[in-house]
Image: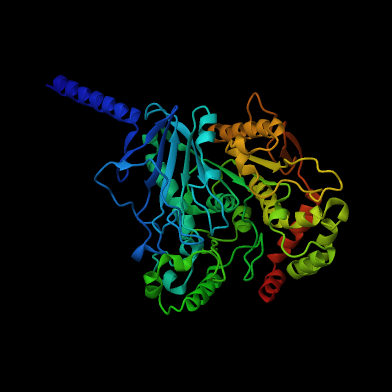
């Protein structure tokens, strides 16, 4: 009888396995919530618009993402879901936005392929996975055995509004980081379900650019992300500056108390007197920057426990391999006001106080380079120092490998060209990573660099190291040998950290800002 029972069980398991593989081959999967039907496209199975949480509407507006609502029929996961509310009213956006997408080359569910998960940028006020710049298909096709995924998250005030009343109702006694919690919920869903797509839940790497890269940095420091991912790539990210009541690029963070006061002003501007009134308002009332502030995460003591530099100095972070870097002329995208030596000196003194003279010497305004060195102060304050400090602190207190890069891909402008001295603008690297080679104006040098970057990124997702036999060697960053990979075409090369002497001057400012004197000065300015 025991043998008969065993044989019956074995046959049942075999039948179930065959049925599962048959369904997988047809793009039909059973995931958390119900069945989803994807579509086949030349070796990939693609799933778009998969719910990973309940719609954050009504009573769930400004709450941590709730469990997904199950569905009874087969969900047709063939089109992107609407992105989060932003900008002007459009059918492309909706408050019901918590969906993710998966591109898998797996033929069966038991392949255990590594996974690379994209988090979009947009200043925490804009962005969505349906943006053509973030389409993962070309990158998925360029890899050999790697699953790609992307996650929507709430942006703007619907994603980051903090209020005393919201903090009081929260079981965690915090408010303001709903967009980050969406990212975490999406990663947790992938961790629980990616094996159904042929993925390995123990080999997940996150990557993002701009606000997405900053998100990656924050997720690396959040205790809520423990064991959710095993590697991280940050493009023009990092969040290692101290909090400040009046924010600047690179000093974007506010304390929960300051953010709550901002929230009260927004409530007043909207003519509301209670949280209930805010929740009853049309979602488009909270779109864009018209309320006097966009969205941005806050140091809430829960999702983000503390100043990230402090967390890393104390070894309180998720110690995973990181590949991090920035572009050579990020400052061109974030420099405001007239480009003159006088304005540059005035604005530098306003922001940096007693450190202005040293920074003006380290980053001088010169007509010879078209003012690029002055723009580099903006670049490094917002991205370069953040990334370099991340590398230094992780090498000091962590065990995992650090790989640093400097993206610098642009024509050699003649000296009389108005673009002379410019380098790679903010976001230029995205097309290179995503293999969107049709967008390149200089394919003879851009395409080889894009191919190399795609291989570096996917190697890192597979092995925790970007290096491969057919690529220039990318050395690990250490404080003893602080090397950076210069991503320039057609052939990348390793070299010293750019502007390291200037970065050390900027570091002295950020160090001072954490003293009692520096904190008091920031409160007053």
**Residue 227 seen in this snapshot:** no
Image x and y of residue 317, in percent: 55, 51
Up/down of 499 relative to 436, above or below: below
Q: Residue at x 28, y 49 (%)?
A: 70
Image x and y of residue 14, in percent: 25, 23
- Left or right? Give the position of 302 relative to 1: right
Residue 409 position by quadrant: top right
- Left or right? Give the position of 43 relative to 308: left
Residue 244 position by quadrant: bottom right
Considering depth in this image, is 399 or 357 the residue closer to the camera? 357
Q: Residue at x 16, y 19 (%)?
A: 3
Up/down of 177 relative to 147, above or below: below
Image x and y of residue 389, in percent: 68, 51
Image x and y of residue 6, in percent: 19, 23
Considering depth in this image, is 467 or 435 the residue closer to the camera? 435
Residue 139 position by quadrant: top right
């Amino acid at each position: 009888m025991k043998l008969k029972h065993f044989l019956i069980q074995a046959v049942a398991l075999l039948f179930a396995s065959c049925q599962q593989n048959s369904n997988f081959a047809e793009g039909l999967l059973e995931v958390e919530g119900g069945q989803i039907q994807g579509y086949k496209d030349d070796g990939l199975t693609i799933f778009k618009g998969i719910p990973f949480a309940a719609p954050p509407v009504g009573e769930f507006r400004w709450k941590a993402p709730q469990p997904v609502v199950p569905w009874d029929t087969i969900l047709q996961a063939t089109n992107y879901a609407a992105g989060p509310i932003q900008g002007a009213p459009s059918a492309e956006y909706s408050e019901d936005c918590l969906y993710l997408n998966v591109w898998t080359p797996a033929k069966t569910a038991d392949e255990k392929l590594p996974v690379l998960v994209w988090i979009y940028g947009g200043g925490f006020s804009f962005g969505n996975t349906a943006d053509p710049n973030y389409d993962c298909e070309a990158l998925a096709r360029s890899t050999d055995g790697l699953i790609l995924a992307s996650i929507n998250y709430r942006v703007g005030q619907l994603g980051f509004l903090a209020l005393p009343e919201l903090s009081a109702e929260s079981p965690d006694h915090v408010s303001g980081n709903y967009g980050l919690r969406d990212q975490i919920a999406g990663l947790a869903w992938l961790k629980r379900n990616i094996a159904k797509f042929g993925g390995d839940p123990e080999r997940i790497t996150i990557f993002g650019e701009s606000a997405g890269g900053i998100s990656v940095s924050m997720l690396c420091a959040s205790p809520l992300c423990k064991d959710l991912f095993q590697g991280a790539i940050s493009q023009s990210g990092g969040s290692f500056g101290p909090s400040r009541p009046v924010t600047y690029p690179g000093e974007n963070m506010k304390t929960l108390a300051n953010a709550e006061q901002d929230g009260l002003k927004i409530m007043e501007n909207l003519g509301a007197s209670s949280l209930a009134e805010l929740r009853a308002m049309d979602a488009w009332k909270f779109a864009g920057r018209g309320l006097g502030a966009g969205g941005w995460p806050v140091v809430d003591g829960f999702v983000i426990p503390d100043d990230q530099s402090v967390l890393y100095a104390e070894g309180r972070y998720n110690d995973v391999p990181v590949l991090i870097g920035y572009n050579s002329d990020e400052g061109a995208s974030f420099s405001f006001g007239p480009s003159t030596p006088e304005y540059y000196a005035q604005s530098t003194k306003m922001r940096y106080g007693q450190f202005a003279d040293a920074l003006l010497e380290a980053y001088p305004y010169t007509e010879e380079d078209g003012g690029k060195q002055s723009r580099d102060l903006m670049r490094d304050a917002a991205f370069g120092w953040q990334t370099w400090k991340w590398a230094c602190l992780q090498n000091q207190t962590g065990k995992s490998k650090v790989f640093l890069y400097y993206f610098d891909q642009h024509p050699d402008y003649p000296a009389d060209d108005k673009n002379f001295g410019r380098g790679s603008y903010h976001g230029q690297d995205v097309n290179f990573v995503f293999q969107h080679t049709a967008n390149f104006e200089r394919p003879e040098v851009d395409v080889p660099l894009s191919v190399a970057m795609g291989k570096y990124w996917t190697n890192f997702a597979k092995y925790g190291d970007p290096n491969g036999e057919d690529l220039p060697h990318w050395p690990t960053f250490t404080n003893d040998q602080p090397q950076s990979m210069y991503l320039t075409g057609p052939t990348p090369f390793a070299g010293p950290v750019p502007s390291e002497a200037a970065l050390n001057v900027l570091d002295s400012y950020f160090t001072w800002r954490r003293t009692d004197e520096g904190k008091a000065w920031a409160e007053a300015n």
